[in-house]
Amino acid sequence: MKLDCNRLTKFDLVEEIEKESSVETIKKFYSTINEIEKIDQFIKDLPSFPGSTDKIIRGELISAIGATLSIEGTVLDKEEIEETFRKADLGEALKRNEQEAENSRKVYSFIKEFVKNNSTGFEYSESLIKQLHSYFTADMNYLSNTPGQYRSNFIATFGVPRKESLCRTQSEIEDAMRNFISWLNNKSDGILSHHIFVKAIMAHYYLSEIHPFGDGNGRTARALEALILNAQGINNYCFWSLANFWSSHRDQYITYLDNIRETSEPTAFILWGLDGYKEEIKKIKDKVLTKMKRLMLKDYVQYLFRDKKNKRIISVINILIGTGKIQIKKFNDLPEIQALYTKKNPSTKFRDYKKMIEEGLINLEEIENETFIEASFKILDSISYNI
């Protein structure tokens, strides 16, 4: 059955279909949820090192901001977003797309602070959603949009291809948002609908379909999705990661949203979103483990040469861990490497490299007549300990 405003604002699409969900669908749902929860708990259980954790979280934040903006047609790469943050921190003037990126940073910062300050629980409200929208669209001259205010009596069009909003009048929008907030705060006991991931994904869908604002609806909907996940304890690395998945599969994302409108059937979108989140959280896990291995290798090298007067190798490995695989010529030309060997005999560097190879600390690889060097983490799997 095709959606209209009255059907949409019952906010029971999942509740209706879960009554008839097949055993296979339910098994797939819970299998994916279990995998996500295991990975999430694994990441939470790992020790957190402030420097490393901050780098990963900042990188994921930048990725999420780039993703949620790209869905709307604003394309900024990592370096451009980093430069935007630098300019904003210094109070420099921002271009239009830079302002959108800075506004997005303010939204995610607000979410983290809001959840932290309401750790004992809170109720969702229209003012909270308006606040998200206000941050997103502040200092932007979007047509027919006022930050933090619902649109007036005009029929909004959005998406690709363009489609009209189901809630057309201001009265319909106000009624829809009032019912939406009631749904957000209501705890379902359905076999699918009770789960927080379903709540977050469907909140994202419902808000984007209501389309209550003049502009910035998609970003606000994805931010609400992130807020719901963060409020329920999804770890700080990952609560915004669905934005990355939606952006990476933008055409499919739009098709799934359109299909729900045509069929009133959200199961496929939910399962697809869960699979996407699982893939995103696996990437986070790999990044966290890589950071752990880097710290472990640094610790092992420090231990290995603890009684040696020559600490150069410790410095070389630490620098190499930071650069990753690199042409050996470029590596040797680094100022910090040159500083270690400037006053040394050329044979000193040769002996150090020979020692690092013998200890299994580095790998050398020939690629298209160029020699590359990288730190070897395999040694961590073969360390023997005295007992």
Image (spheres, rainbow, N blue to C red):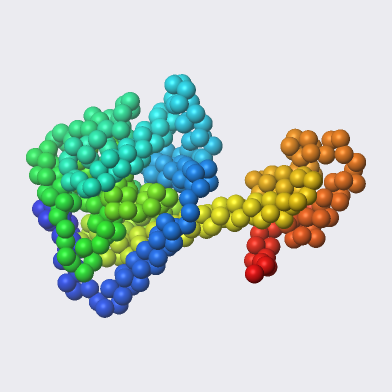
Quadrant of the snapshot with the C terminus: bottom right
Q: Residue furthest bottom?
A: 23
In this orientation, does residue 315 appear?
Answer: yes
Q: Residue at x 41, y 41 (%)?
A: 65
In this orientation, does residue 162 appear?
Answer: no
Which quadrant of the structure image shows residue 201? bottom left
In the rendered image, the vertical position of residue 141 relative to residue 82, given as above or below? above
Q: Residue furthest top?
A: 92
Front-most of 272 and 382?
382
Quadrant of the snapshot with the N terminus: bottom left
In the rendered image, the vertical position of residue 368 relative to residue 309, given as above or below? below
In the rendered image, the vertical position of residue 35 relative to residue 73, given as above or below? below
Front-most of 325 and 22?
325
Residue 22, percent from left and from top: 25, 76
Residue 88, percent from left and from top: 44, 26
Specify whether 293 is left or right of 56. Answer: right
